[in-house]
Image: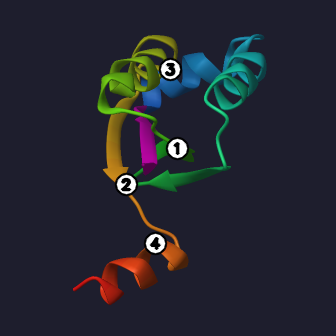
Amino acid sequence: MRVLVRAMIPTIAGNKTVKDPNFLKNLQDYIQKFNCEASYFLEVNGNRTMVFILDLPSPDMIPAIAEPLFQTFEANVEIHPAMNLDDLKKAISNM
């Protein structure tokens, strides 16, 4: 199942995170490990925010996806099921 993962890093933790020389490597490792289809970086409500789109093989993968973001970046994490246009077309045709 495709999911959208939103990780919001509070300001104090974010200030520390971006000064860490391993920040970009940790980020790249995360993106590669979970084979993210897309990744975006933006501000949401004043917080540094990362958004990843990835395929979640099963719900028991949620801790594996969330924990690195909690622990490495001290982020607040949300995971939302998501559909692309083909998924939406299929869903509507089955209604």
Identify the residue at image location x=37%, y=54%: 45
Q: Secondary structure at mark 3?
A: helix
Vertical comparison of 89 with 57: above or below:
below
Lower sequence index among marks 4 and 1 = 1
Residue carrying label 4? 87
Query: Where's residue 91, x and y in %?
Result: 33, 78
| Foreground label between 2 and 1 | 1
| Disc 1, SS | strand
Q: Nearer the viewer, residue 18 or 87?
A: 87
Compared with residue 6, is residue 61 higher up or lower down, i.e. above or below?
Answer: above
Question: Which is nearer the N-term, disc 3 or disc 1?
Answer: 1
Residue 73, numbered label:
3
Residue 50 visible in rendering:
no
Neighbours of disc 1 within 10 Å: few (<14), some (14-19), many (20+): some
User: Which region is colored magenta?
Assistant: 1-10
Residue type of the residue flagged with mark 1: Asp
Q: Which mark is residue 55?
A: 1
| 36 shown above or below 29 | below
Q: Which residue is mark 2?
A: 45
Does residue 41 appear to the left or right of 5 in the view shown?
right
| Alpha carbon separation for disc pair 3 and 1 | 21 Å
Q: Nearer the viewer, residue 39 or 93?
A: 93
* Disc 2 to disc 4, C-alpha distance: 30 Å
Q: Position of residue 10 (x, y in %)?
A: 40, 32
Task: Calculate the distance from the C-alpha at mark 2 to the C-alpha at mark 1.
Answer: 27 Å
| Label 2: which secondary element | loop
Q: Are marks 2 and 1 in contact (CB under 8 Å)?
A: no
State whether residue 59 is above or below residue 88: above
The kind of residue tagged 2 is Asn
User: Disc 3 or disc 1, which is closer to the eye?
Assistant: 1
* Residue farthest along the left direction in this orientation: 95
Q: Position of residue 33 (x, y in %)?
A: 66, 22
